[in-house]
Amino acid sequence: MNFTCQCCGACCRVPGYVALEAGEAETIASFLGMDIYAFTEQYALLTGNRGNLSLIERPDGGCIFIQDDNTCRIQPVKPAQCKGFPFQWKSKQLKAICPELRVGATGRAPA
Ligand code: SF4
Ligand code: SF4
């Protein structure tokens, strides 16, 4: 799939879980220079099914780590869920808000 991210940050501002896989909380905590307990207390919560930790959201529903310039504060260690979009997964919700995927839906790239 040809895909050129426009770095608009829209996918990081959509309300929804950013679930953490095993070991990711420790990796992000280390990147931020935080103790794992302090990190989980400040930045994580349980998903509704109590099956995972997820990142907390801003009051408007966006990810806590999206910055004003649309960059990710934890880019080098962002969760696998984030790394996988849109190459390994996409949803109708995200397809609707991603300008590059919308272009694909209207006939230009991606191939
Ligand atoms: S962790 Fe980074 S890439 Fe993932 S949703 Fe948050 S800001 Fe976006
Ligand atoms: S919504 Fe699409 S174009 Fe915008 S940052 Fe996310 S992946 Fe890139």
Image (tube, rainbow, N blue to C red):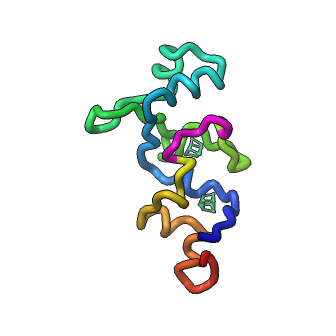
Q: Horizontally, is 51 left or right of 90 in the view?
A: left
> Which x, y percent locates residue 91?
42, 62
| Position above or below: 38 against 22 | above
Looking at the image, which is closer to me, 42 or 29?
A: 29
Q: Position of residue 53 (x, y in %)?
A: 40, 31
Q: Which residue occupies 29% across, 38% down? A: 48
Q: Determine the residue positioned at 49% across, 57% down.
A: 88
| Relative to 73, 35 lies left or right | left
Q: How many marks?
A: 0
Indicate the quadrant where residue 46 lies: top left
Q: Is residue 60 above or below residue 64?
A: below
- Report the predominant secondary structure element of the magenta stretch: helix
x and y, in percent, of residue 14 in the image: 49, 53
Q: Write the start and end of the magenta stretch as one range.
A: 75-81
Asked if residue 39 lies left or right of residue 16, the reply is right
Q: At x 50% / y 27%, what residue is drawn? A: 25
Task: Report the residue that reaches farthest toward the right.
Answer: 69
Residue displayed at 44% across by 35% down = 21
Looking at this rendering, what residue extends furthest in the left direction?
Answer: 49
Name the quarter where the C terminus is drawn: bottom right
Which quarter of the frame holds ligand 2?
A: bottom right
- Write down the quadrant of residue 74 in the picture: top right
Q: Is residue 70 magenta?
A: no
Where is residue 85? Give x, y as percent.
Answer: 53, 55
Above or below: residue 61 compared with residue 98: above
Pick the residue in front: 30 or 99: 30
